[in-house]
Image (cartoon, rainbow, N blue to C red):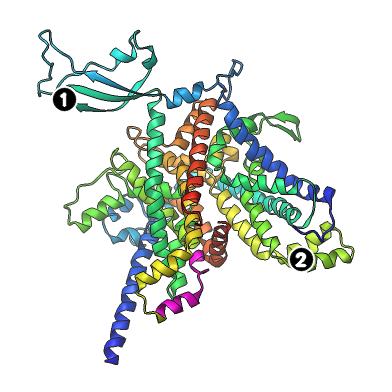
Amino acid sequence: MRSSLTSANREGWAFALPGIVLIFAFIITPFILAFGFSLTNQRLISPNPTRYVGLENYQQMLGLAFVTLDAKQDPNGKVATDPSGHPEFPPLRTITRNADTPQYRGMQEWFRWETGTQAHLVIARDVVFWKALVNTCLFVLIVAPVQAGLALGLALLINQKLRGITLFRTIYFMPVVVSIVVVSLLWRFIYDGHDGLLNNMLAGLSFGHFHPVDWLGNPHTALGSIMVMSIWQAVGFHMVIWLSGLQTISPTLYEAAAIEGSSSWQTFRYVTWPGLRHTAVLVLIVITMQSFALFSQIDVMTKGGPLDSTQTLVFQAVQRGYGLQDIAGGSTISVILFVIVLSISLLQRWLTRER
Amino acid sequence: MAAIRADNHRLRLAVRYLVLILIAAIFIFPLMFMVMSSFKPSDQLLSDTSSLRAFLPVGDLSLHNYMGAFERAPVGLFVVNSIFVTSTTVLLSLLVCSLAGFSFVFLQWRGRDVMLSIVLATLIVPFETIAIPLLLEVSKLPWLGLSGLEWGWLDSYRVQIIPWIADGLTIFLFVQYFKGLPEELIEAARVEGASWLQIYLRVVLPLSGPVIATAAILKFLVMYNQYLWPLIVVQQEQYRPVMVGLQYFFQLSPAWGEIMAYLTLITVPVLAFYLALQRAFIASIATTGVKG
């Protein structure tokens, strides 16, 4: 790169060595260890020696099957029904504890749907893992576009030439410097089912017509509530990244658009947006990576509950690796998480590549 | 005609400001609620939530919650721990990463380009995916301390500091910045017989104010807000940082007044720091956006 400079092998290594050693010791080594541990039964503290188990952890984690149960029949061949006329199905253990179907041994129901006299069940070896995986993906799929979109909207607002605009920029960015742990505890009170700020505010605004909701205690609202709070905390971060992208667009392009008499939507569509391609890729990759790492909010607000509705991959990895001292299980989840994050960022790069 | 246009213009301006102010309220109200509540007795704190009083310094204000928080937990110790761990890591990180960046940009050595690619590749590894194996690794590492050789880094300051000193992003920031410095300066110093260390100290560092500020702010935010890592490697109260100290306030019927006092106490210094240096804070986040 700088051929005019003399070569300085020893000094070059000496200057870079502390950084390189630390990165190898504390990023690359544990990264490789994660793959290694996921193929063993490693525990944090264990009297038994560690053993190589191949892909057993992955089979245990990812094992999934689809089964159909026929409704119970009485001796005359009529479908048995409960008092409300709903067909009765045999319990799942007739399959999972049956010597004829050893492949389903130990599996549990994840979810089911019924068609007439048949019930279709998806059963898994590790139901909590699958719930965590689905919740994490749901979180990413909703938070990434919504947060990126809102951040772009804020950036466009803040990019106006108005007196005092930096004051608003300062305020919008403020939650970013506040720890997500602090924010989570604060919002636990805001979302509280009894005296929560949100319930009381909504009751006041609707003159008492609003029925209080236990936002974090209800499996239907818990994950959504955490999404809203997470967006509130981080949207300022991405607003600033969009803003730096907006400011790289040449003002002459806007002048040209103004002379052509283009509407503000046309200006956005044909001048602003094409200039933001690189920023868009970056914002999406960063939000995706941050969203997949969802942990602190869960640990402070719900611990994965209620009814596993807020379990996430990182929370499960920590709960197993640290709480249950099952380093192998935690590492397996970590590897799965890494593979997902890597494929998605490659996919995003490929989808938004220069054509 | 002109008067109508001026009125129209004023109306649109008013609408714009109204939108800006409403959005600002969304961001600032929860934080105002936190600060105001920290001064209110618990029953008033709860009853105020049904009106705008929740965001205002009204009623029976006192420092009782703060005293309660200090009684419940060794808050002072947690703050000192966090400040020590954060400042040490930031300083060491600036030193180690700027030296590495300097070497990657200005010196020629065998294996340099491969090493740089490896360092940059670590940017795609989220910390959360290596936390568990790293936990096992540090629990077995040796340490030569005042009391001789010991094994295991758990429950210490070093376990909170050393793994966080070097990272791909900080090295990348220095590399990008150093590439923009005029090469002639370095060559002139070489011709005059300056050593590489002298060039680093006397020529490059004095020109690196902006990148040092950026790297320091980003590292500061990461370190002060640490939660997952100290949660799993620190069991003893003695080494606990502020965010993990929050657990002293989790219980079945939380004392919200004390919680708000603790939250305010650990957040307001950072907010003050941010407000004082907001230009530098925002610029440092914006710089991370250049890497695309």
Residue B34 on the magenta span: no
Viewport quadrant of the N terminus of chain B: bottom left
Amino acid, disc 1: Gly
Residue A251 on the magenta span: yes
Amino acid, disc 2: Glu
- Horizontally, residue B232 falls left or right of residue A141, namely right
Q: Residue at x 72, y 50 (%)?
A: B96
Q: Nearer the viewer, residue B142 or B40?
A: B142
Residue span colored magenta: A244-258
Q: Residue at x 56, y 65 (%)?
A: B277
Helix, strand or loop at label 2? It is: helix
> Pointer 2: residues within 10 angstroms few (<14), some, or many (20+)?
some
Q: Which residue is mark 2?
A: B183
Q: Which residue is mark 1?
A: A116
Q: Nearer the viewer, residue B58 or A59?
A: A59
Residue A236: image quadrant is: bottom left
In the rendered image, residue B169, in percent from the top left (x then y), is placed at 61, 51
Q: Residue at x 59, y 17 (%)?
A: A51
- Horizontally, residue B192 falls left or right of residue B18, namely right
Helix, strand or loop at label 1? It is: loop
Q: Nearer the viewer, residue A167 or A24?
A: A24
Viewport quadrant of the C terminus of chain B: bottom right
In the rendered image, residue A56, in percent from the top left (x then y), is placed at 50, 21
Magenta part mainly helix, strand or loop? helix
Which residue is the extreme one toward the right?
B193
- Estimate the spatial distance between the alpha carbons at disc 1 and disc 2, rounded to whole Å: 78 Å
Residue B56: image quadrant is: bottom left
Q: Nearer the viewer, residue B276 or A21?
A: A21
The chain ID associated with circle 1 is A
Which residue is the extreme one toward the front?
A355
